[in-house]
Every structure is written in C-alpha cells, then in structure tokens.
C-alpha cells in the first residue's frame, strides 16, 4: 500500500475496526464509528475510514493512544494453607499474593481465616468478585470442621437452626456429623469468623477448619499450597449460577479488593 492510499482501501480481511474498538473500549458500535468518522482512529499510522477491517497484527490508535488488548481474565482455585493471610497488602508477611506467586496481578474473592485452610478463589475480574460476595446471592460454601470435644445432638440442632452472634442470629444451615468431633457444614452467609463464633457460643472451640467447596467448585485433591485454573465447565456453571447477580459500583475499584478489612471471614 503506497502512502496515498487510505486505510479504507485495504483488502477486506480480518474483523471490522469498529468491532475491535467496541470490545476494547466498552463503547457502542455508533460511538466507535463516530471516533473513526472524526479522524481520531489510525491503523498502522494512517487515518482509518468507517468499514475498515483489521487483523491481529495491525496497530490501532484512538485519539493518539494505542488500543491495547485487555488482560486475559484469570480465575484460580487455591488451597490456602494455615498461616496465609487473605490480603493483597504485600508488606504483610505471609500474604496470599506472595504465597500464590502468580505472574499477573490477582486478588482473593472473599476471605478465609489465617488459622483456616481450604478453597479460595483468586481473580483479576472485579465484576465476578462482587457477584459472588453480595450478601443476597446466597451461594453455598461448604466446610469440614473439627472441634475440641465430642459433638452431641443439641449442638447439631442449634448450629442448624441459628446461633446468636454479632448482634444477629445466623441463618439456618445444613450440618452433618462426620465423626466424633468433626462435622460438615454448608453456609449461605459470611459473617466475621462465623463458624468459630457459632461453636464458641455453644461451648466448643474449633481446632481445624477447612473449606472444601464454593458453589459448584470443590477442593477435591488439590494439594495444600497448590492452585489451578477453573475449568471451562466450572466457569460456565458458575456464570449460570451468578446470572441473577448484578454489578455494583465497587466492582471497578480493584485497589480496594482483598484488603484486610474488605470482606467478612468465615
């Protein structure tokens, strides 16, 4: 192509320029076309025309700034060990970011006590964080808990029906005895140190707490300290379960996510 040709004269291949602008700038097709019509868009240094098609190799500028691809969205399942703190504050020893050692910036979805172990999600997607954590969403979280003395029927009944903590009464939950001092519990809320406070109210102390499931994702045989990416099937099911969830204004404030006081522990 010689210097007298406009970008619009190029062979029609690749995707529409307006579509790429829409995808990477979160704007409408009309807004993208207006930018092109106004001469604000260049492809490989030349002013583009409406209808231009571009390939992956083409360099696109909008208002003098390179149009950059969004970072790939990352969704990790991590088996948090005891002693790791669910914070992105790097000056805190044993923070979860240093523990995971992921090459891109990610943050935890919710929290798990420093004294607890088990499944926690990490991501760079602020939208899904708020969808999962909104109190009204009632998403299951399953734990295996060991206490310091034998469990009895009254304990199981009270835990299941609701326990007064933090100036409220916990919502009914599903609980099943696993062994003499161990039980499985499924919660649909996330009050601060909820399970520990519930058991303490009834005269028991937690000696081990392990989260084994969040919604449709199970810890399974993921080793302590190891992480894996969620599978396409897990993500598809997760998105379906979250379909009724709405975005919140805080979703874009990634700097606040994962801070030591951002979300309740369990």
Image (cartoon, rainbow, N blue to C red):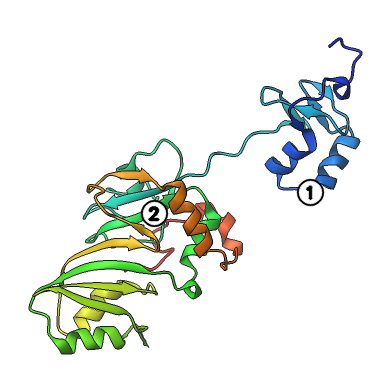
For residue 28, which numbered disc appears in the image?
1
The 10 Å Cα crowd at callout 2, few under 14, some 14 to 19, many 20 or more, is: many
Q: Is residue 17 above or below residue 23?
A: above
Name the residue at 39% across, 74% down: 188
From the viewer's perspective, tell me whether residue 34 is left or right of residue 162. right
Q: Is residue 42 above or below residue 83?
A: above
For mark 1, give the secondary structure.
loop
Is residue 163 in view?
no
Q: Which residue is mark 2?
A: 121
Name the residue at 87% across, 25% down: 8
Front one among 98 and 159:
159
Q: Residue furthest top?
A: 2
From the viewer's perspective, tell me whether residue 176 is left or right of residue 7. left
Q: Quadrant of residue 156?
A: bottom left
Q: Residue furthest front?
A: 233
From the viewer's perspective, tell me whether residue 32 is left or right of residue 125. right
For residue 234, which numbered disc appears in the image?
none
Front one among 65 and 130:
130
Q: Quadrant of residue 45?
A: top right
Quarter holding the C terminus is bottom left
Residue 251 x, y percent position in the rendering: 56, 58
Name the residue at 86% across, 35% down: 36
Residue 236 x, y percent position in the rendering: 50, 54
């Amino acid at each position: 192509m010689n210097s007298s040709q406009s970008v619009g004269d190029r062979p029609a291949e690749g995707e529409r320029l307006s579509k790429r602008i829409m995808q990477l700038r979160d704007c409408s097709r009309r807004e993208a076309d207006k930018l092109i019509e106004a001469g604000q868009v260049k492809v490989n240094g030349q002013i583009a025309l409406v209808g231009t098609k571009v390939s992956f190799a083409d360099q696109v500028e909008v208002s003098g700034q390179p149009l950059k691809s969004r970072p790939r969205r990352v969704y990790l399942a991590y088996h948090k060990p005891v002693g790791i703190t669910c914070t992105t504050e790097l000056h805190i020893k044993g923070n979860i970011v240093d523990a995971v050692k992921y090459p891109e910036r990610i943050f935890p979805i919710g929290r798990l006590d420093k004294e607890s172990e088990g499944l926690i999600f990490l991501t760079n997607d602020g939208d899904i964080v708020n969808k999962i954590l909104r109190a009204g969403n009632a998403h299951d979280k399953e734990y295996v808990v060991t206490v310091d003395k034998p469990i009895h029927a009254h304990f199981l009944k009270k835990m299941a029906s609701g326990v007064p903590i933090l100036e409220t009464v916990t919502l009914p939950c599903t609980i099943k005895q696993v062994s003499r001092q161990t039980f499985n519990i499924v919660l649909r809320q996330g009050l601060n140190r909820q399970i520990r406070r519930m058991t303490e109210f009834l005269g028991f102390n937690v000696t081990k707490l392990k989260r084994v499931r969040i919604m449709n994702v199970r810890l399974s045989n993921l080793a302590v300290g190891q992480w894996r990416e969620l599978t396409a099937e897990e993500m598809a099911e997760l998105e379906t379960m979250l379909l009724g969830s709405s975005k919140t204004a805080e979703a874009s404030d990634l700097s606040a996510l994962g801070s030591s006081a951002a979300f309740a522990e369990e």
